[in-house]
Image (cartoon, rainbow, N blue to C red):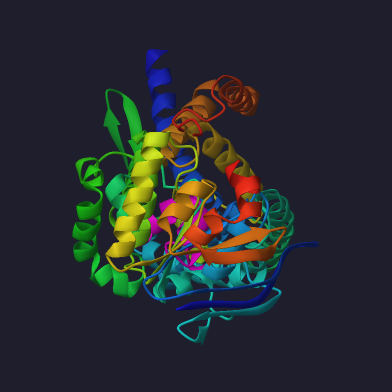
Amino acid sequence: MLQELAQKLVFGILAGGLYGLAAVGLSLVFGVTKFLNVAHGELLMLGGYAAFGLFTLFGVDPFVSLPVVALLLVLIGFVLYKLLFARMVKLTEDNKIKNTMLVGFGLSLILQNVARVLFTADDRGITTTYSGEAVTLFGVSIPVVRLASLAVALICLLALHLFLRKTYTGKALRATVQDWEAATVMGIDIQRVYLLAFVVGAALAGVAGALVAVCYSISPTMGLDWTLRALVVMVLGGLGSIMGTFVAGLVLGVTLSVVGGAWREIAALLLFLLVLLLRPQGLFGAKEG
Amino acid sequence: MLTLEGIDARYKDLQALWGISLQVGEGELVALIGPNGAGKTTTLKVISGLLKPASGSVLLDGRSLAKEPAHKIVELGISQVLEGGRVFTGLTVLENLELGAFGAKARKAKDDSLRWVYGIFPRLEERQRQRAGTLSGGERQMLAIGRALMSKPKLLLLDEPSFGLAPLLVAQILQMITEINRLGVTVLLVEQNVRAALELTDRAYVIENGRIVGEGSGEALLSFESIRSAYLA
């Protein structure tokens, strides 16, 4: 019984790291640009297929191909931003959220169907030679690919954290989150800041998608689930805190895993509502002002 | 140094400025006074490029700023302190100041500028590791001005730097502005505190309903009957 609970806890944490990674990308984009890109899950999906393709066609190990996948998603993010999102920069915050949601929704349908045509509707997964291996600790089994994925997620978030804290560009990003007009009169080109946030968000989604392909499975329609989870985690964690978002990912992962069965989605949404009622700024977000 | 000629500006359907013309000469400290909603802030936004005018021209040393985006105008030497200071509360004092020197040229001279600003506002150096959100109102205003100075501007635009401060602090901030002007920075000051503004500036423009309705030396305007009755009664 206790053993079973411990096992669920571990699986929950391992999955939660990926929820956190997926949510941090969404949160970064939303925080900086106020674009609510509901096609974020489809970017994960594309990342997953990119890693899958590199593995099956060229035999590249999925952990080795991560930088390539990230770069590819930067490219895709760049094109999508220039094509669809750049024109919404000048809108008011309310209208940005509404318009990007609509555009994102349309985009997600297009990407899903393109993926279905290109990759078929089958579930796919990356099975490496070491995919079956697991470390056993006190009778709890920890699959190595999932452990490695958690480590990759942590490294990505740590790198993002350092980038935002230590570099000039990172500070400009944080300034833009707080007050874009004040940032502009500092001489910061907020159009470039927006673009940067968007492509970094896409790259994080791509990496998360590749890890999903390694640990679980991917399909053309996986996006919506991941967007919703990322949204829940983003709100749970509170805007503006990377580590907060990551921990919120773990909280969601553990909740889904421990509750299990048909009740898991209900439990996750109840948790979501509870946090909104009691701590609307999120578990780790700072109160406004 | 700065010339505005026949500026019309509008927010969507609402015209806010009607044919505004004004000049600020090198080294001057010029005030722009007028009631709430007269167009003072809008005028500053047109100069800094946050709002592009519908017609008319903005010239800096004879160069038109019409096509320059706001972030470029900072690099050309115009720095603006927005109303209320608008410091980045989640960032430290030092980070705020660093962002003031964001442009490539300003970034190279960052350490120099930082020493200069700390010389003017020693309080900021004492508090450099603190988050800007923990500062008092007066300190925030100092940080906002210090941050604007980090780009070593030729022209400093100040939007109501004394707003919301206690009278003693108002005098202190205005004193510092004169000091900054004496150090060679040209200043265009928007101020509600009309008497104080007129006492410390070389020249002032009076703006009402989006139009310039008066201009003169601070002294002359102070003795001007309609100004006295409208603002100093």
B177 in relation to A253, above or below: below
Q: Which residues are magenta?
A: A169-193
Queried whether the magenta region covers residue A125, the answer comes back as: no
Can residue A178 be seen at all in this image of the molecule? no
Q: Main secondary structure of the magenta part?
A: helix
Quadrant showing the N terminus of chain A: top left
Residue B106 horizontal side relative to residue B25, left or right: left
Viewer-proximal residue, A198 or B95?
A: B95
Viewer-proximal residue, B134 or A106?
A: B134
Measured as percent of width and height from the top left, residue A85 is found at 64, 64
Can residue A118 be seen at all in this image of the molecule? yes
A288 in relation to B95, above or below: above
Viewer-proximal residue, B183 or A138?
A: B183
* Residue A64 placement: quadrant: bottom left
Which residue ends up furthest to the bottom in the rendered image? B62
Which residue ends up furthest to the right in the rendered image? B13
Queried whether the magenta region covers residue A178, the answer comes back as: yes
Q: Residue at x 62, y 68 (%)?
A: A86
Measured as percent of width and height from the top left, residue B152 is found at 31, 68
* Residue B21 placement: quadrant: bottom right
Measured as percent of width and height from the top left, residue A73 is found at 50, 65
A81 in relation to A243, above or below: below
Q: Residue at x 53, y 36 (%)?
A: A233
B64 in relation to B102, above or below: below
* Residue A90 placement: quadrant: bottom right
Q: Residue at x 60, y 58 (%)?
A: B40
Viewer-proximal residue, B48 or A158?
A: B48
Looking at the rendered structure, the number of numbered marks drawn on it comes to 0
Which residue ends up furthest to the top in the rendered image? A1
